[in-house]
Image (tube, rainbow, N blue to C red):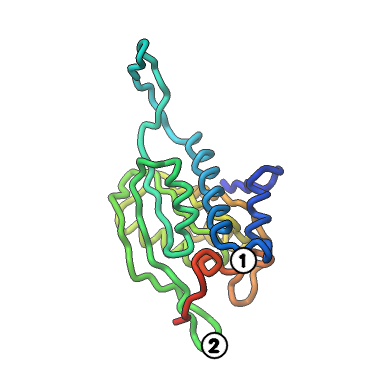
Amino acid sequence: MVVNMSESHSLVSNWVSELRDTDIQKYRARFRRNLERIGEVAAYEISKLMPFGIFEVQTPLGLHNSKVLKEQPVLATILRAGLPLHNGMLNYFDKADNAFISAYRKHKRDGSFEISMQYLSCPSLENRILIISDPMLATGASLSKTIQFLKNEGNPREIYIVCAIASTVGIEYLQRQCGIDIKIWCGDIDDEITAKGYIVPGLGDAGDLSFGSKLQY
């Protein structure tokens, strides 16, 4: 299951266009807020697919049988670029447990890179609904490794991926590595990636645009 939230014109496609715009990218707060908004919409849409039950609520004037989620998901994100998207989802799943993973591209002199993972803070994932947010799904290497890293902590019942922009190459790689049962929600999908693994036209480096440039190691 792959959902492109920009396939039909909506506010999501407006926000994605602003994320891509080099003039608007100069305003970090606006860039972060647009990522946050995409996370909010994705959380709302995913909530429709989650199991719910009937809960009796006492109002000032009587009782009401309300539909509520049966369980809260685990929201996971990859530091640091995923934080705005994650925060948007947390605005809606405000009772969710959270997981944080450090994963980054460790570049080599020949221009290639490997995925380095150094940190994980995570609740139990056994039989839980897991939603992983990462703004850019490019090659799929970091997300694939992240999923395997998380599965070492337990076996989630369902896995959702939420990203602002994905590449078709990355989606196909993730499905080969992790199974087609993983559900992917994208703000938009681009068809091309460069030899260095960046999405074209994409939007650039989401982490740098959100929080400032970093030293490369």
Q: Residue at x 54, y 88 (%)?
A: 110
- Three-letter residue code for mark 1: Lys
Disc nearer the start of the sequence (2/1)? 1
Mark 1 residue crowding within 10 angstroms, few (<14) / some (14–19) / many (20+): few
Label 1: which residue? Answer: 26
Asked if residue 1 lies left or right of residue 87, the reply is right
Asked if residue 165 lies left or right of residue 149, the reply is right
Pick the quarter of the image with the C terminus.
bottom left
Q: Residue at x 39, y 44 (%)?
A: 129
- Rendered image quadrant of residue 69: top left
Image coordinates of residue 126 in percent, x first then y, are 30, 47
Label 2: which residue? Answer: 110
Q: Residue at x 36, y 59 (%)?
A: 100
Q: Mark 2, mark 1: which one is toward the viewer?
A: 1
Image coordinates of residue 135 in percent, x first then y, are 53, 59
In-front residue for pair 19/115 = 19
